[in-house]
Image: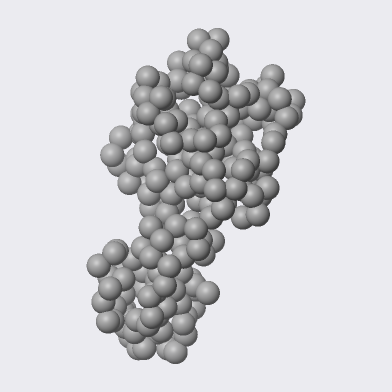
């Protein structure tokens, strides 16, 4: 079923008119027609059935049905990632959102001190919104950063299972269901010895992805696929 991301107040209305980019998404890209059904989601777990009641040349009217709640995933994955270049960051956010990551937090490291700015994050949020509509997951990942390195204790505070990617790391283990799993992904130049020491002080254990040297966005998506795939996502 086609998903459409809407604002929370739109989810409570009796009807909804769509135009602009949302109209093009539904009636040009997805080719919906009058009478077709879809699902409206607010990105935070709320959902509601809808039906296309009327299609005009530049807008359409949706009739809203019964509200529902999306099923929560068996675990929560948070990625703490050294910021790659903006185009690569967009690819990372798109694929991690499709896989079902709950949060993507960019963290500055000694070898990746990059910043994105407000416009850059607006772009990443649009990419995440399009990704959850395409994948029909309905839950929008939290995006934040770029965080300073000394914010790590706060970023890891809610994680029951803490890991960091490292070429010398051990094998992967299946995380417990209902856990919050945090995975730290370093820059392509690798962690510094001080950063590695700090991660271990905070209870993160090193895990590996084989012998290949991966780009940061590839490593982050591979880690997400391993964890969420093993969790039955």
The image quadrant of residue 119 is top left
Residue 56 sits above or below residue 215 on the image:
below
Q: Front-most of 189 and 194?
A: 194
Q: Is residue 175 left or right of residue 46?
A: right
Q: Front-most of 20 and 40?
A: 40
Residue at the image position 74 percent from the left and 25 percent from the top: 211
Tag count: 0
Across and down, in percent, residue 116 comes to 35, 33
The image quadrant of residue 61 is bottom left
Across and down, in percent, residue 60 comes to 33, 81
Q: Is residue 77 left or right of residue 58?
A: right
Q: Quadrant of the C terminus?
A: bottom right
Q: Is residue 48 visible?
A: yes
Q: Is residue 151 left or right of residue 70?
A: left
Residue 51 sits above or below residue 210 on the image:
below
How is the structure coloured here?
A: one colour
Across and down, in percent, residue 170 comes to 71, 25
Residue at the image position 70 percent from the left and 34 percent from the top: 172
Residue at the image position 29 percent from the left and 64 percent from the top: 8
Q: Is residue 43 left or right of residue 99?
A: left
Residue at the image position 34 percent from the left and 81 percent from the top: 64
Q: Which residue is at the far top?
A: 193
Residue 102 sits above or below residue 215 on the image:
below
Q: Is residue 85 visible?
A: no
Across and down, in percent, residue 85 comes to 46, 32
């Amino acid at each position: 079923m086609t998903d459409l991301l809407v604002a929370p107040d739109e989810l409570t209305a009796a009807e909804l008119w769509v135009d602009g980019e949302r109209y093009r998404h539904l009636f040009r890209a997805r080719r919906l027609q009058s009478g077709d059904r879809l699902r409206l989601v607010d990105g935070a777990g709320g959902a509601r059935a809808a039906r296309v009641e009327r299609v005009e040349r530049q807008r359409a009217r949706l009739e809203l049905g019964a509200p529902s709640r999306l099923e929560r995933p068996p675990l929560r994955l948070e990625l703490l990632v050294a910021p790659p270049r903006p185009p690569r960051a967009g690819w990372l956010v798109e694929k991690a959102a499709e896989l079902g990551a709950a949060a993507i937090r960019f963290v500055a490291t000694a070898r990746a001190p990059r910043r994105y700015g407000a416009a850059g994050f607006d772009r990443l949020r649009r990419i995440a919104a399009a990704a959850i509509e395409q994948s029909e997951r309905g839950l929008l990942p939290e995006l934040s950063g770029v965080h300073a390195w000394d914010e790590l204790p706060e970023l890891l505070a809610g994680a029951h299972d803490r890991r960091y990617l490292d070429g010398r790391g051990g094998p992967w283990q299946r995380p417990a269901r209902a856990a919050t799993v945090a995975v730290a992904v370093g820059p392509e130049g690798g962690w510094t010895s001080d950063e590695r020491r700090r991660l271990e002080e905070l209870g993160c254990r090193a895990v590996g992805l084989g012998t290949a040297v991966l780009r940061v966005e590839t490593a982050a998506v591979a880690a997400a696929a391993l964890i969420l795939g093993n969790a039955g996502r």
